[in-house]
Amino acid sequence: MTSTSTPADLHASLRGRFPDEVCEILVRFAEASATLRDALAVAPLDGMLGKTGDVNVQGESTQKLDERANVIFREALALPTVARLISEEEDAPIELGNGPYTCCFDPLDGSSNIGFASVGSVLGVYEGVPSDPFSGDGIRGRQLVAAAFTVYGIPTMLIVASKTEVVSFAFDPSDCVWRLAAEKIAVPAASYTSINWTYHGRWADHVVQAVEGASDGLRGRYSGSMVEDILRVLMAGGVFMYPEDSSSPNGKLRMLYEVNPIGFIMEAAGGAASTGALPVLDVPVTSPHQRCPFVAGAADVVQRYEAAYAAGRPD
Ligand code: AHM
């Protein structure tokens, strides 16, 4: 379904699906995404491609656009209803106040593709996070009340999920607004398998069996930007996998602002998201940048992965 959408209409499309305060957070995320889209579009012309020379808390070289994106989202999401922000680009949580929500974001996902291919942004909105978030049992993905991600490609897409529904918006550059593109998105039957096969030699035997079992009969597509690969899985069916390997024993992707928001969106679209052993949304997160293995997509394919993983796993 297509309909016109002004910024107010974006808010109206989200109202009814979310409390007003969550709508406001999601609208801010959409507006910040539009700002970042503009910056990405002219980056080859204005000296914004390339590295800063700094290394972030993950040990990765920071690019100029990573820093720019972080500032854009940090400023946009600093609302009175938000108690803290947790960003991939910040060492520690940014404490803001006593609001009910904790916003976790990856300002620029797929950094290695900046200037070459699609990149994106990811947001998770958590509720009920204690004032000392990583004490005790930590945070769980089940505390998410909303999640969203943007893919800066052609088209530029915004995907937004509540616990029960996934909707998409496309950015219309002719008048710079987000227009409703699709409602009630459901992961279709599997088509594509999305994984970095060059890591095959680093996988344990049970991971090899699980990856090959899940991929059986599917066609390979992998971009190096999770957001792009996840958008394909959501719209065209299949599975995205970033399992543990000998170089990354807990996988690469971070739970609070990558794995959990995407897992929440997959479950809301009727799919599934797993570490291989259990749903990602049930894993306790006890540090801001905690990682976990990640398999997300059509429920039957994820179940196939889990079954092969359990059967082959050493005791
Ligand atoms: P980033 O936060 O540095 O962009 O890393 C996350 C990205 C994902 O978008 C993508 O799925 C993955 O890293 C690709 O990693 P690899 O190059 O190991 O396949």
Image (tube, rainbow, N blue to C red):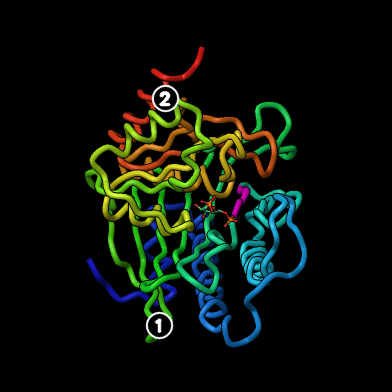
Question: Which mark is on residue 309?
Answer: 2
Label 1 vs 2, first from the N-terminus: 1
Answer with the quarter of the image where residue 167 lies.
Answer: bottom left
Q: Is residue 79 left or right of residue 174?
A: right
The residue shown at (56%, 37%) is: 292
- Image-based side of 27 in relation to 234, left or right: right
Label 1 residue SS: loop
Q: Residue at x 48, y 42 (%)?
A: 242
Residue 111 belongs to the span the image colors magenta? no
Direction top: furthest residue: 315
Please say whether residue 154 is visible from this viewpoint.
yes
Residue type (three-letter) at the residue carrying disc 1 = Pro
The magenta region covers 101-105
The residue carrying pointer 1 sits among few (fewer than 14), some (14 to 19) or many (20 or more) residues within 10 Å by Cα, namely few
Amino acid type, callout 2: Tyr
- Please say whether residue 148 is visible from this viewpoint: no
User: 243 or 200, which lies in front?
Assistant: 200
Query: How far apart in space, not on screen, are marks 1 and 2 (Cα)?
Result: 45 Å
Residue 158 in the image: x percent, y percent?
A: 42, 64
> In the picture provided, is 205 more to the left or to the right than 60?
left
Instruction: Work out whether residue 35 or residue 275 is closer to the camera in this orientation and state it.
Output: 275
- Asked which secondary structure carries label 2, the reply is helix
Q: Which residue is mark 1?
A: 173
Q: Quadrant of residue 114?
A: bottom right
